[in-house]
Amino acid sequence: MTRFMMLFIAIGLVLFGCSQDQTNGNNSKEPPVVSGDSSADRALNMEVSRSTEQKLLPEYAAKNESGLSDQDFETAYEMCVKALSDYYKAVWNGSDIELDTFIENDHLKQYTQQKIQSQYDVHAKHSLTDNPVQNIDIGAWEVEYRDDVDGGYLYLHLPVQINMTVGGYGEGTEFLVRNVNGRLVIVDWYTGAKDSYDFMVRGGNLTIDDPDIWNDSEWVKKLDRMTDEF
């Protein structure tokens, strides 16, 4: 074989290899190859899951996974203040409120939704939404731990001043808070001001001391009938 023929074959092989590389590179619409559930993949999936769980940690996490302590007082207070702020802006301004952030019990969530909608409708009907809530101030609040067979609960009383664009008003609200799987949640929420929604539907001058009241199906059914009549 002459030197010219050898050079020609070598050039041909190089061009053929380049052509195949370019063809594969231009085939970008083909889906990537996905490996099976190898040990490396499982390790990666575990890391992704762990990272996702960290992002989904509750905003109002309890100090311990179970039970309550005085280290939860401040967090419970912050949660209740945020709930009140969002609540008053919902019933006066028509703002959104994410009840899932504060409440786990479906019965209490449903009642609170009805309470918000009812009050907003009344305010809108009388053109009171033209004077929206700006912010709230909390007075001398109190919190105490109360023991029970389910790990105890916190009782909070928050006197609140609702500041509107013009004027404002004040009232007090009571909360019961539990630790549910490491998350602080409101298990009861009562505002007993005269002529308030709670006063009219649930009754006045109540003693708020039953953290399991919204799990009582008979009581909830009775309350539902009262709500329908209101």
Image (tube, rainbow, N blue to C red):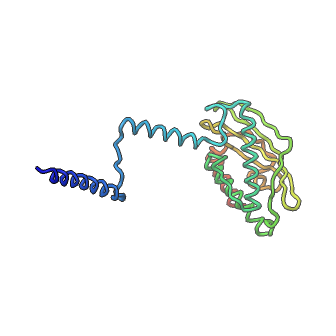
- From this viewpoint, which residue is outermost toward the right? 167
Residue 159 in picture, x, y percent from top left = 83, 46
The quarter of the picture where the C terminus appears is bottom right
Residue at 70% across / 61% down in the picture?
A: 117
Between residue 40 and residue 198, name the one nearer to us.
40
Q: Residue at x 35, y 47 (%)?
A: 34
Apparent side of residue 39 relative to residue 144 in the rendered image (left or right): left
Q: Residue at x 87, y 62 (%)?
A: 166
Above or below, 47 relative to 23: above
Number of numbered discs present?
0
**In the image, residue 147 lies at what x, y percent?**
71, 30
- Residue 28 locus on image (x, y percent): 36, 58
**Residue occupying the far front of the picture:** 3
* Residue 55 pos. (x, y %): 58, 43
User: 45 or 220, which lies in front?
Assistant: 45
Q: Nearer the viewer, residue 7 or 160?
A: 7
Which residue is rendered at x = 72% and y = 39% of the image?
76
Q: Is residue 40 left or right of residue 199?
A: left
